[in-house]
Amino acid sequence: MKFELETYNRNVPEQELIDDLIRVSSDLSKNTVTIDEYNERGKFHSTTLTRRFGSWFTALQKAGLNKTRNLNLSDDELFGNIETVWLKLGRQPRYNEMLSPLSSYSAGTYEKRYGTWLGALRRFVEYINSEEVETTVSIETKPEIAPAHKTKRDINWRLRFLVMRRDNFKCAACGRSPATSPEVVLHVDHIKAWEKGGETVYENLQALCSVCNIGKSNLDYKVE
């Protein structure tokens, strides 16, 4: 095979560059495209577009697409995305799996922030473990008065992840997992219903698939 230098694509018409950027956004089913996503799927390299239009944001604007937010993403947004992908897979995500539509941000985005993909995963674990997890809540009420909640009903993503990990990313009732059945959607449910005074704490939560969760309704039970 003959070795050749890469061409700089200096003579490519602007409209062809814009059309290719629009094509990538259509392939991703998104109204924006990151530099990493374009380099993975585009006909040209992102530097060809940034040289031609002055910046990546200007190229997006000319293509009628939204600006990407990767430069201003918080750790919470990036780690929340890892959690989402991890739950969908039912296991630790790999570098080459951090692609749309499974992931909102590419592995390259994490490399830029944390040095390496492994470094990002380590920081994610540190972030998860940095929060104190309440296991019980002491509630003192009169018998005739409904218990007053000491916690919020909403389950934050870090607590949800800890419960999912404890339950091996499987439904505690039927044992199904997104890892083996992609159509399975896991929820984290209160064992003692919130409406009956159940608190949003580690010990009162369990992983249930959407089917089992709907069947449970507001019944109080813990799957053994």
Image (cartoon, helix red, strand yellow):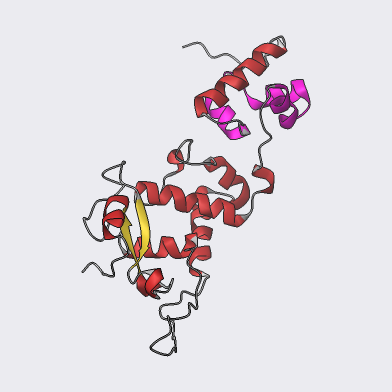
Q: Residue furthest right?
A: 54
Foreground of the two, 54 or 147: 147
Q: Position of residue 76 (x, y in %)?
A: 58, 57
81 up-or-down from 165: above or below? above
Counting labels gives: 0
On the picture, is 123 further left or further right than 8?
left
Instruction: Name the spot of residue 64 as percent of width and height, x first.
Output: 68, 24
Q: Which residues are magenta?
A: 35-62
Q: In the figure, 109 relative to 148: above or below?
A: above
Between 74 and 4, the one lying in front of the other is: 74
* Quarter of the figure that contains the C terminus: bottom left
Measured as percent of width and height from the top left, residue 24 is found at 56, 23
Judging depth in this view, the residue of 46 and 1 nearest the camera is 46
The residue positioned 41% from the left and 80% from the top of the image is 136
* Observer able to see residue 170: no
Q: Is residue 42 magenta?
A: yes
Pick the front one: 46 or 198: 198
Q: Residue at x 63, y 15 (%)?
A: 19
Q: Position of residue 142 (x, y in %)?
A: 42, 90
Q: Does residue 16 lie above or below 205 as drawn?
A: above
Image quadrant assignment for residue 169: bottom left
Give me the residue at 67% from left, 14% from top.
9
- Residue at 46 percent across and 53 percent down: it is 83
Q: Is residue 149 magenta?
A: no
Residue 114 horizontal side relative to residue 52, left or right: left
Magenta residues, dominant SS class: helix
Instruction: Single out the residue that lies furthest toward the front.
Output: 144
Q: Is residue 3 visible?
A: yes
